[in-house]
Image (cartoon, grey):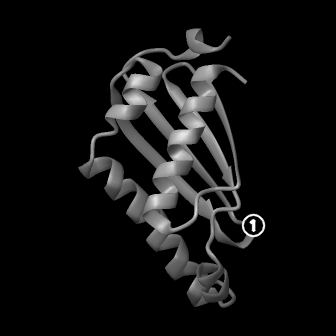
């Protein structure tokens, strides 16, 4: 794994731990053109896992997780991510499959990132 991707993943893990009380157990990030596509495994807290035992609970956890992370990036410009990849952050697209405890985040930047791979 390149140093840039390792730093990128560490920052995402730290931010999510601060926000939700638990960061992902594992993150896999690939750089594609001007995007960093991150798959995050093992995101949910024990409380969220308990809530997600019902259909209604899964919807609550899904909505809270996806909306909250998108709001954070919209309101708090991720300067640290920009420093790591050397590009301006444009947008974040994020979704989660609560039943499998897997999330996907697509970070869009203003220029290609593929040259950052060692």
Res 81 → quadrant = top left
For numbered disc 1, what is the local secondary structure? Answer: helix
Res 30 → quadrant = top right
Q: Is residue 93 above or below residue 9?
A: below
Q: Quadrant of the N terminus?
A: top right
Q: Relative to residue 49, is residue 56 drawn left or right? A: left
Q: Is residue 70 above or below residue 27?
A: below
Identify the residue shown where x is 49% and y is 67%: 20
User: Residue furthest toward the left?
Assistant: 75
Identify the residue shown where x is 65% and y is 70%: 98
Q: Relative to residue 32, is residue 86 drawn left or right? A: left
Q: Is residue 110 above or below residue 52?
A: above
Residue 92 location (% of width, % of height): 42, 43
Q: Is residue 109 above or below residue 23?
A: above
Residue 73 location (% of width, % of height): 34, 48
Res 115 → quadrant = top right
Q: Quadrant of the C terminus?
A: top right
Query: Considering depth in this image, is 54 or 80 the residue closer to the camera?
Result: 80
Residue 8 location (% of width, % of height): 54, 33
Say few, some or many: other residues with alpha carbon within 10 Å of mark 1 (under 14 / 14 to 19 / 20 or more): few
Residue 34 location (% of width, % of height): 48, 22
The residue wearing badge 1 is: 100
Identify the residue shown where x is 54% and y is 19%: 33
């Amino acid at each position: 794994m390149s140093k840039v991707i390792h730093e990128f993943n560490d920052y995402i893990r730290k931010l999510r731990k601060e926000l939700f009380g638990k960061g992902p157990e594992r993150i896999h990030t690939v750089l594609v053109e001007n995007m960093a596509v991150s798959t995050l495994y093992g995101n949910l807290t024990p409380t969220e896992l308990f809530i997600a035992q019902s259909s209604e609970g899964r919807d609550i956890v899904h909505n809270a997780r996806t909306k909250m992370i998108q709001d954070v990036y919209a309101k708090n410009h991720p300067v640290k991510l920009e420093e790591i990849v050397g590009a301006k952050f444009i947008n974040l697209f994020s979704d989660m499959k609560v039943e499998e405890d897997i999330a996907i985040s697509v970070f869009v930047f203003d220029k290609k990132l593929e040259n950052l791979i060692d």
